[in-house]
Image (cartoon, rainbow, N blue to C red):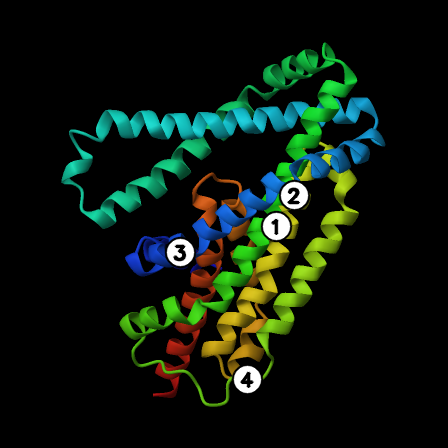
Amino acid sequence: MRQLSGFLIRSVRDMLRWNILRFALLLGLPLAALWIGIGYQIWDPLVALCAKLIGWIPFSVVKANGAMMILFFIWLIAVLVSFAALTALVGPPILRYFKERTYYFYTFTALLGFSGFWAAAMFYKWDELFPRVEKLLALLPFNTVAEASAGLLAFYLLYNLFILSLFFAVSLFRKHFLEPLREQYYPSVTPPQDRVGRFHGVRLLNDAFFFLVISLIAAPVLFIPVANVIVQLFLWAWLYKESYFLSTCNLYCSKADHENLTRHRAVIAAVAIMAAVLNFVPVVNIFTPFFAQLMFFHWIMEHRQSQKSEEA
């Protein structure tokens, strides 16, 4: 577990490589455009369906959840506006001297920094902000609150489908961006001949099915403040935990390596949770599946490299 910080730094650094950025743009942007188009076509019936679901929920719960979701969007806007303001201020005099890779590092770290800052600020003022937003919602007719919550719920459903599609796409093309990293960082560690026999595609489908089913079953929890964040974090972590560990291990692990690494359940869970947290960060979320894959890659390759050193 102590080595995770090192794997974290290396994975963040690798995400800023053009090879990874290119895949993120080529995969993420078309998928985002696809789901925006689908959402535009089905928005009205989807919102109507969500409104019916919300109609079964007590108004006090809808009001509390609506207040939390509004605060979330305020946080999102604060992060994006702060990043845009900083870039506008330091861009002309400073960013022009940055190398291309350094600019990507600035973008990534600035978004993470502002996300953490505004999250901490809102948490510090939570006792003041939350009751005020709740009072504002209480002044509105029930239908207005329900319709607003239905729109937010519809957006949430579409966003999860985007995350799920990106989850599949990154796993499908994982070798194209992992293999150059292996050749650069671990040239002496070659893929074993007795690779793990389990086909990772079955694991992907099982986890995706579980993700969809539990998302539907847990839909009422989405209206309970705090609990909805915990449930969503659990679902995203579950999505990455076994599937991405196995998909990476399927390329670079022998059967013995896989059995040995599987015992480290805490490490696998920690990597998945770290990746799942990034899904809450705007813009950075497009890199989440790459981050999970890279973390597992460096962990597995370091394990194999240490095993090779011991044998020598």
Question: How many angstroms separate mark 3 from mark 4 (CA)?
Answer: 33 Å
Q: Secondary structure at mark 4?
A: helix
Residue under numbered circle 2: 157
- Mark 2 neighbour density, 10 Å: few (under 14) some (14–19) many (20 or more): some
The mark nearer the N terminus, 3 or 2, is 3
Between the residue at mark 1 and the residue at mark 4, the CA separation in whole angstroms equals 33 Å
Q: Nearer the viewer, mark 3 or mark 4?
A: 3
- In the figure, 274 relative to 253: above or below? above
Q: Earlier in the sequence, mark 3 or mark 4?
A: 3
Circle 3 sits on which residue?
26
Q: At x 61% / y 58%, what residue is drawn? A: 239
Find the distance from the CA under tag 3 to the CA under tag 1: 18 Å
Marks 3 and 2, how far apart at CA: 23 Å
Q: Amino acid at mark 2?
A: Leu
Badge 4 is on which residue?
255
Q: Along the line of sight, which residue is nearer the eye, 163 or 182?
A: 163
> Circle 1 sits on which residue?
161
Q: Earlier in the sequence, mark 4 or mark 2?
A: 2
